[in-house]
Image: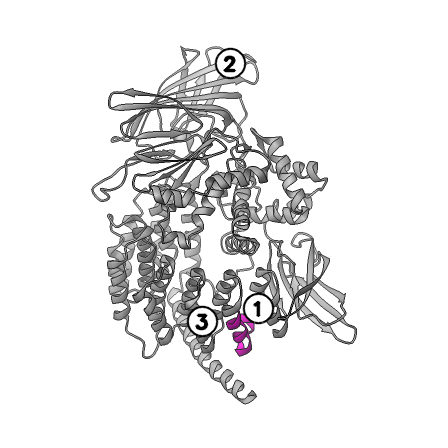
Amino acid sequence: MSQSYFDTDSHKHKPFELPGAKPHYNPDRPGQVERIFLDISLDIPNQRYDATCLINLLPIRNGIERLTLDAVNLNIKFVLIDQARQRFEYDGEKLSIYLSEPTQLGKQLLLEIIYTAETPQRGIYFIQPDKHYPHKPTQVWTQGEDEDSRFWFPCFDYPGQLSTSEIRVRVPKPLIAISNGELIDTEDDGDYKIYHWSQQQIHPTYLMTLAIGDFAEVQDEWRGKPVIYYVEKGRVADAKRSMGKTPRMMEFLSEKYGYLYPFPKYAQVCVDDFIFGGMENTSTTLLTDRCLLDERASLDNRNTESLVVHELAHQWFGDLVVIKHWSHAWIKEGMASYSEVMWTEHEYGAQEAAYYRLLEARSYLTEDSSRYRRPMVTHVYREAIELYDRHIYEKGSCVYHMIRAELGEDLFWQAMQIFVQDNAHKTVETVDLLRAIEKATGRNLTFLFDQYVYRGGHPDFQVAYAWDGDANLAKVTVTQTQASPGNNSQKDLFDLKIPIGFGWANSERPVELKTFTVRVHEQEQSFYFPLTEKPQFVSFDVGNNYLKTVSLEYAIPELKAQLEFDPNPISRIYAAVALAKKGGLEATKALAAALKNDSFWGVRVEVAKQLAEVKLDQAFESLLPGLKDDNSFVRRAVIEALAHTKTVESYKAVKEIVKDGDRSYYVEAAAARAIGAISAANIEDQPKEEKAIKLLKSVLEEKAGWNEVVRSGAIAGLAALKTSEPALNLVLEYTKIGTPQPLRLAAIRALGKISVGQSPVNLERILDRLADLAKETFFLTQVAVLTALGQMETPKAIGILRSLADQTADGRVRRYAEEEIVELQKNIGSDNALRQLREELDQIKQQNQELKSRLENLEAKSQS
């Protein structure tokens, strides 16, 4: 349930640690694992395999009598050391081997574990066609991160152990097997083929992989090394379109990191039903096949390019330089996410990169404000996978950018290169990054890490400006609103050196920006700047390098000038937000001009969003020209803004797009969503609900296409019709098994949204359906069920969430379910009263908008 009107608790941050969280450390090392060798024979139809796992271990000390390995739900037949049978105990999670002779320092042991596995829960996944999905490919693939390798082979399963690895696997023809490193041998065995792969550079167990399928193989190369894309047959063109920039990315990252791509090949394997976007297994990345773009999707889908460069960046940050413990995962995930920013800058320019970074920052800010706040480095959790959140990816990326801003371009890359070179084929912790920075540049950045890495949060700045014409002084007052007034305790405050710029511009001459750097470290500070003439605009944090939120308290003329002239797109966006807050006709006109004239599409997107925030009918008129914008991201944002204006005119404008289509899948999807949202509002002369349902039904019947993007938009449109039983019936229809998976997941998620206006009888139908769906074991289905339940406003959802938390094999699902239970318990009780209040509030807002619009028109007439 949305908390927007009634959240009295929003200034308090929820804790990251859930009940049961405890400190986690790497186990004591009995010795150095030097080599892991797996020999596997697969029985794919029965989802089982026979295997032998050989581990060469060099003991670290004398007298160890017992070795403990991680191994979950494996059927252990027997254990040998140096070919002699050993006594062992196995409890389904830990394999304890009692050594017949205690270890001797320097004398290597060869462990041999013979085992079988049947229908594994995690770690290794069997994908096969069935009666519901007869066209599904036959595939087997593994997923080790974080601690899932133990589900498919016995190992010391933590990132601090690095060793070489080999996998020899027997698969039925015509399937092929791909793994880490180089293919050193293949042999025919009747209807089977044996593949033998060897990875000679050391790496941790979580990066060992196996991918099996009837793949088409697309060959490419970089500096003589093979670069290969494996995809389902028939998707070769999509593979080239989606991954074809890989060799150029390898060149770019090799140069940036000051270390040539370190492995013998780079393969990317697109697999079905993958549970992540991608996984950076050493030299062999696995990607979801949903990242493969057709021609139309490639017009405005940059996500695939970002995913490809992200996983490639991990071959250095994560695979070559390995984190010693999960608590330091931000080092690799932050840099992989920052490499998306770097590649965007390289490929599309500085404005695009700045906007990409803003979107990353917002992603983290949302998690921080609505989910929990935590330090980026923490070893207190229940399961390591909980750490893989917006704090380590997006906030991590922003921290790397702040390091770059602090050191400057040349020194930053020198520091990163020293870090990679000094730690290649080793494990690292956060302190090693600080040491590399100091070694390369002499700079000690502990102050930055203390504020952004080792504690949670970020500064929330409020910036006010005034001009004293007599003294020619600009006064800028900066308040850190995350700290309570009058509180100068360092606990809540940030201490940063921030550049403030004053700008002069007109259409004839380029912008002149005079910049002063000030130290912001108190709860409230005023700074005075002598200037020769009054500036037209003020730019706080020139370059926008710091991770922060900012609210500009300037007068309209300064905000208009900043929106028009500030060279930095993020500053222009902040000005747009501040103008929309002011509201009124003058602000609306300034935003309308920016929607037409701003040279950068990212600013036009944000301006469209802000026009929706201005509750004036004139804002609607300003949006319409944006439907013809050349950029599909802008057209999409305009449609989403029209969905908020909810008038007969906005319905007509959007309906045309639903009927006539658009070159972009995403624009069509946005239009389908908007039709539902606008129809759901009680507007006089409103085209009736039936018409909207009929229109959306036609989309569902006619628009099957790439990844079901458009039809999923239609489902979301139906979900907005919260009181409609026919809309609910349609949504339920698409939750059935056999529906193409992306569309089915969209329909499951939509049940939550549509539930809040339905009759008690229909609410029971929805709950019954979700209870059934919650029994399915596929990760993405479980997440969709969670999303639906989290939007509901009934205590009955709690029981389903509980059962999901108890029976899921996935730590992420467990955590989300428990968080949603807490939210639901907080939100219910007075849910009907809340809903009525909300509806009344919406009606009052609508009436206010009409009155304000009329007043603005009258004022404009009287002035003219």
Quarter of the image with the N terminus in it = bottom left
Q: Tell me which segment is drawn in magenta.
A: 578-594
Q: Is residue 353 magenta?
A: no
Distance CA(mark 3)–CA(mark 2) = 72 Å
- Apparent side of residue 741 relative to residue 285 in the rendered image (left or right): left
Instruction: Please state which amino acid type lies under the numbered disc 3.
Output: Leu
Q: Position of residue 639 (x, y in %)?
A: 40, 66
Give the answer, above or below, for where 116 lies relative to 22. Answer: above
Instruction: Please state which amino acid type lies under the numbered disc 2.
Output: Gln
575 or 840, which lies in front?
Answer: 575
Q: Which mark is residue 623?
A: 3
Q: Position of residue 551 (x, y in %)?
A: 60, 64
Q: Identify the residue at horizontal 55%, vertical 88% (top origin).
A: 864
- Tell me if I can see residue 21 in this picture: no
- Which residue has dot 1 on it? 578
Q: Position of residue 293 (x, y in %)?
A: 37, 48
Q: Position of residue 243 (x, y in %)?
A: 42, 42
Instruction: Please state which amino acid type lies under the numbered disc 1.
Output: Ala
781 or 86, which lies in front?
Answer: 781
Distance CA(mark 2)–CA(mark 1) = 67 Å
- Which residue has dot 2 on it? 108
Label 1 crowd bin: few (<14), some (14–19), many (20+), radius 10 Å: many
Q: Identify the residue at horizontal 37%, vertical 42% (top origin).
A: 239
Give the answer, above or below, for where 82 lies relative to 609. Answer: above
- How many marks can you see? 3
- Of labels 1 and 3, earlier in sequence is 1
Asked if disc 1 and disc 3 are in contact, CB closer than 8 Å, the reply is no
